[in-house]
Every structure is written in C-alpha cells, then in structure tokens.
Image (cartoon, rainbow, N blue to C red):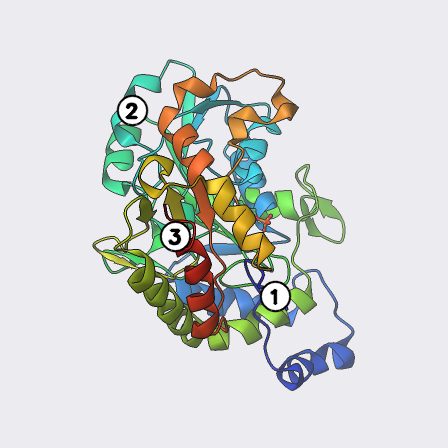
Amino acid sequence: MAIMVTRSSMPEFDEYIEEIRSIWDNHWLTNMGPKHKEFQAVLKDYLGVEKLDLFTNGHMAIELTLQAMNLQGEVITTPFTFASTTHAIVRNGLEPVFCDIDPYNYTMDVEKLESLITDKTCAILPVHVYGNVCNIEEIDRIAEKYNLKVIYDAAHTFGETYKGKGIGTYGDASCFSFHATKVFNSIEGGAVSFKSERLGKVLYNLKNFGIHGPEEVSAVGANAKMNEFCAAMGLCNLRHLDEEIEKRRRVVERYTERLEKTAGIQLNSVQPDVKPNYAYFPAVFEEKEFGSTRNEVYSKLAENDIIARKYFYPLTNTFSAFNGKYDVFKTPAALHVAKRVLTLPLYADLPLEDVDRICDVILSCKK
Ligand SMILES: *Cc1c(COP(=O)(O)O)cnc(C)c1O
C-alpha cells in the first residue's frame, strides 16, 4: 500500500459515536451549541489563551481577522506558505508585500522586514512555517515602532509554546487551522486567539451575520461558524493529541538519525525555547552536494509508492492567479528553498520500518 504524506488522526469509532449521542437528543446541529461551547473552553485551556473563537476553517479565521481589523493598504507577509495566507490578504482588498524567508527555519527574515515598511503598511502577517516559530521579539519590536498590527498564521503551530507561553498569546491575533491534514483536526475547523475584547466582538459578528438576537442584526457579517459535529471531532481528537505528538516525535527522530549525516540534505531542527508539535518533516535537497535534485528524489519515492509533497512549491507570489504581478526575485531565499524542499510522510501511526524504507530510497539517490 502507498505511503501518503499524511494520514488524518481519528478517534476510535465508538468514542466519536458517544460524543455525538447528545446531538441526537437535542437536535442542535450548529449555531454555537453545547459542543461548540465545550470545545471553545477546552481549547482556551489547552492553548493557554484567554480569548478565542471558533471558525468553520483556518482560512476564514485569517480572512475575517484581517477584515475585523478594518485594515487598508499593505500587509507584509511571506510567499513560502499555503495559498490561504496570501489569498486572505488579497480577498480583503489589501496589497501583499512579500518579505524573504530565513533559509534555515523558513519563517520571515526579520533582517529584511523593516526595509519593506512604507507609509501604506498596516500589518504584518508572518507564518510559523512547519511549526517553526517566527522571530517574535523582533517582529514585535518593529510592529510597535511603526504601529502595525501583527496577525500570526499559526496553522502549523497548534499546541506549541514559546518561552513557556502558548503560541497564541503572541501578536494581536493568531489563526489556527484544524483541517483534516493538520497535527490536530476537527475535520474542518479553525480558531483565532486574540488580545482585544473589541476585536473579538467584531469577529463574532463576521462569523454569524452580525446577528445578536432574534430581532437584532447590528453588523454586516458572513457565515463562518463551526458546527457541532466538527466540535465533537475536535473534542475527541484533543484527548489523544499529546500521545499523537509523542508518536510523531519518534518518527521525526528516526528520520533525523537516518538522514542527518548525509551531505546535501538540510533538515529541520527543534528551536530553542519552543515546545514543538512535530507537524512536518521538511528536507531540503542541495543538488550540488547531494547529487540528485528534489524532483528526482520525489520521483524515486513515487516509483516506490511513497508520496512526499513539494510543500511549499510553487511560492504564492508566483501563482498564475496573480499574472506575474509580483517579482519572485525579491524573495531569493524562498525561491531557493521552494525548488529544493520535500515534506516527507509524517503521521502518528507511521511505522518506523516505513520510515526506514523511505530513508533507504532517499539515500539511494545520493551520488
Ligand atoms: C492549512 C493552512 C491554512 C488554512 O487552513 P484551512 O483550515 O485549510 O482553511 C492557512 N495557512 C497555512 C499555513 C496552512 O497550512
């Protein structure tokens, strides 16, 4: 059987059935029912944040957070991310300005950040890529100096802490994704943790049509609510998350042991002060030292029924949707990594024998 890049975590069938039994009693399927309330409370606790709201998915969490801040002008972000981050900016009528990435941890290169700020800049939207935490102190310092909002795309950092505090406590807001493919899933789902009570009210309006009572609609909003079945899945999966992360750790350590001594493969390392979640295992293949290109490794793995992903390739600033509007040569480190990176299969139940087989195929490409 093929080894896929990921495999969604699911609770035991009976555990989920038990969790959704009460939905058959109360017929409350969506609109902030008991499961939504419970999931929201449990998540605040798990993430160590004071204020958090749930959304139908991670993308709407980002898009509506930008909208709730009522921003205008330019948002500094990076192109080394999932389509969602850039689309959320553009769909709000804002202009993305692409900052290059650090070539080792793939997050925003803060050395290049300040020079991109203009009098139109209103916010910074950095991404904690692969679970690697951005340079929070420097981003904070610059944001404060220029009075900019900071919204973290925290889709990859569920459950992580930085300097002992939940990752969602940093910036003005942090947006999480609970999509099926993420470390933690609620089938589809997302959340925003935020600092300002006022922002929370605007976000709530945006996710529920601005409805505040049977006869009271006080804002113009959309619909981005999480339903009860997704909240129930989240409740079940959260119970097993620590154990799943521990199993992921073993997979990551095996990959690291097998691949770290090979010239031409750059691996990801756990950062100081970070409690990691082992969300992804990116490997960057430098063809000059390794002897084979990323695409050759990708094809060799595919021949062996092993499905890795070129994640993130292409860069968002090269999407055909943007018709060549952005100059990709302004983000050379991102371009370099995007051409050479593969994320290798990684999920809690990936057997270590399979990790060994994957590593054998990769090492057979070494010349
Ligand atoms: C998954 C993801 C999103 C979007 O989340 P969805 O829940 O799929 O809408 C946004 N940003 C990044 C970096 C992601 O990986």
Query: Could you tell which of marks 3 and 1 lies nearer the N-terminus?
Result: 1
Does residue 211 appear anywhere in the picture? yes
Mark 2 CB near ligand 1 (8 Å cut):
no
Give me the residue at 71% from left, 82% from top: 21
Q: Secondary structure at mark 1?
A: helix
- Image quarter for residue 84? top right
At x 52%, y 47%, the residue is 298
Q: Is residue 235 above or below residue 139?
A: below
Mark 3 or 2, nearer chain start: 2
Q: Are marks 3 and 1 in contact (CB under 8 Å)?
A: no
Label 2 sits on residue: 112
Where, by quadrant of the figure, is residue 3 drawn? bottom right
Question: Closer to us: mark 1 or mark 2?
Answer: 2
Residue 229: image location, x then y, percent: 69, 68
Residue 19 point in image, percent of width and height: 64, 80
User: Residue 323 appears at what percent x and percent y?
Assistant: 63, 17
Under circle 2, the secondary element is helix
Q: Nearer the viewer, residue 43 or 355?
A: 355
Characterize the local packing of mark 3: few (<14), some (14-19) or many (20 or more) Cα atoms within 10 angstroms: many
Q: Which residue is mark 3?
A: 131
Q: Which residue is mark 1?
A: 36
